[in-house]
Image: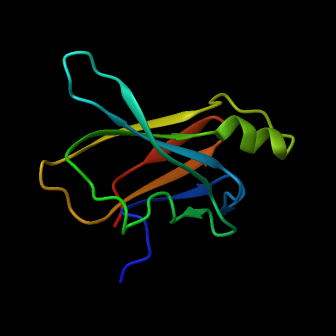
Amino acid sequence: MATKSPITCHVLDSTRGKPAQGVKVKLEYLSSSSSPSLTFLAQGETDSDGRCLTLLNPQDHQLVGGIYRMTFHTGDYFESQGRETFYPFVEIHFKLSESPDPHYHIPLLLSPFSYTTYRGS
């Protein structure tokens, strides 16, 4: 039985060439009602490999189609290392189809003054 969250992430600190350990991550779902609102789903923190694989319990949470937001607390991460950053948060909005795949991976390549993301596998 699968133990990995259906939505995972990986943060790499490109200026150090290393995984970004200790980045707080929050996952929310945007309701599609007439008055959209965000629903908190989970929070976690990246491990020593820069990964957060346990956001959602796969036995308790089945993905539904819609828009999600993953927020990375990058300001706290850089502050803990005595470095400044231009981006205190990185928010990634992504849309899942009405019949979502069983797994989505959100990588984040991070530096104090830029970031890049893409749909991983």
How many marks can you see? 0
Q: Nearer the viewer, residue 113 or 61?
A: 61
> Which corner quadrant of the image does residue 79 belong to?
top right
Percent x, y of residue 119: 33, 55
- Looking at the image, residue 10 sits to the left or right of residue 78; the answer is left
Could you tell me which residue is drawn at 57 percent across and 47 percent down? 25
Query: Who's the residue at 27% across and 30% down the image?
Result: 31
User: Split into 4 quadrants, where in the image is the N terminus?
Assistant: bottom left
Relative to residue 64, is residue 46 depicted above or below?
A: below
Determine the residue located farthest toward the front in the rendered image: 60
On screen, 88 above or below 7?
A: above
Q: Is residue 18 left or right of residue 120?
A: right
Is the C terminus in the top left, top right, bottom left or bottom right quadrant?
A: bottom left
Q: Residue at x 60, y 58 (%)?
A: 12
Using the image as rendered, state which of residue 21 and residue 101 is in the foreground.
101
Image position, residue 98 (x, y; %):
12, 48
